[in-house]
Image (tube, helix red, strand yellow):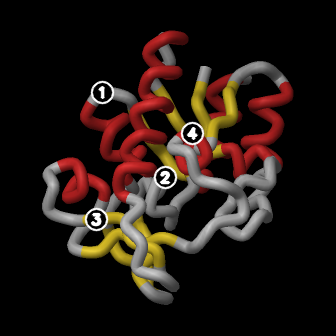
């Protein structure tokens, strides 16, 4: 069983009200092998919402209180929302004893290998990935879906 970014499952939970549907991830949800969650919505943010990026590091830096999650247009600090959402995802994983997640790369919440800063890809992880990883949950990106699907067959 996996937790997956809701936008990858085809739900319109992205900041811009769209999805990033990945057919392989969607198939896992349909087959009952994955639960779609959106950390940003679980943290109390609406959809659509302002685009957010991590300033001063990555998700691990946010957990260590050295970086913040800031709205790109207004400069609003959304750090507490993203931390709350990450903790809710962890709570769900703990309740269901889930040890693996497939999260959307590039996201300030879910980025599993990189986050976006401006228009650049920056090596690092999102806040939810940092929280889950520190709790011992394996996080991979949607690019690993073919390997995951083969392993489930």
Q: Which image quarter is the C terminus in?
A: top right
Q: Are marks 4 and 2 in contact (CB under 8 Å)?
A: no
Look at 41% across and 61% down and name the residue there. Answer: 78
Look at 74% across and 60% down and name the residue there. Answer: 20
**Image x and y of residue 137, in percent:** 38, 29
- The image quarter containing residue 32 is top right
Q: Earlier in the sequence, mark 3 or mark 4?
A: 4
147 or 24: nearer the viewer: 24
Question: Rounded to the nearest whole Å, what is the CA distance between mark 4 and mark 2?
Answer: 13 Å
Judged by depth in the image, the label closer to the viewer, 1 or 2, is 2
Q: Is residue 101 left or right of residue 64?
A: right
Q: Which image quarter is the N terminus in?
A: top right
Q: Which residue is mark 4?
A: 42
**Image x and y of residue 27, in percent:** 82, 36
Q: Which mark is residue 110?
A: 2
Question: Rounded to the nearest whole Å, what is the CA distance between mark 1 and mark 2?
Answer: 16 Å
Question: Rounded to the nearest whole Å, what is the CA distance between mark 3 and mark 2?
Answer: 15 Å
Q: Which residue is mark 1?
A: 136
**Image x and y of residue 91, in percent:** 45, 21
Label 4: how many Cα within 10 Å (few below 14, some 14–19, many 20+)? some
């Amino acid at each position: 069983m996996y937790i997956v970014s809701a936008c990858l499952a085809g739900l319109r939970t992205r900041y811009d009200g769209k999805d990033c549907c990945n057919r392989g991830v969607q198939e896992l949800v349909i087959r009952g092998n994955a639960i779609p969650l959106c950390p940003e919505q679980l943290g109390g943010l609406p959809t659509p919402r302002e685009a957010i990026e991590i300033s001063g590091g990555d998700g691990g830096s946010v957990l260590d209180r050295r970086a913040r999650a800031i709205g790109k247009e207004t400069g609003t600090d959304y750090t507490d929302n993203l931390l709350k959402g990450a903790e809710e995802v962890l709570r769900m994983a703990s309740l269901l004893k889930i040890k693996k997640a497939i999260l959307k790369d590039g996201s300030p919440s879910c980025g599993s290998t990189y986050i976006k800063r401006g228009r650049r890809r920056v090596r690092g992880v999102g806040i939810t990935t940092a929280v889950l990883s520190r709790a011992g949950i394996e996080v991979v990106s949607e690019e690993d879906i073919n390997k995951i699907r083969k392993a489930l067959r």
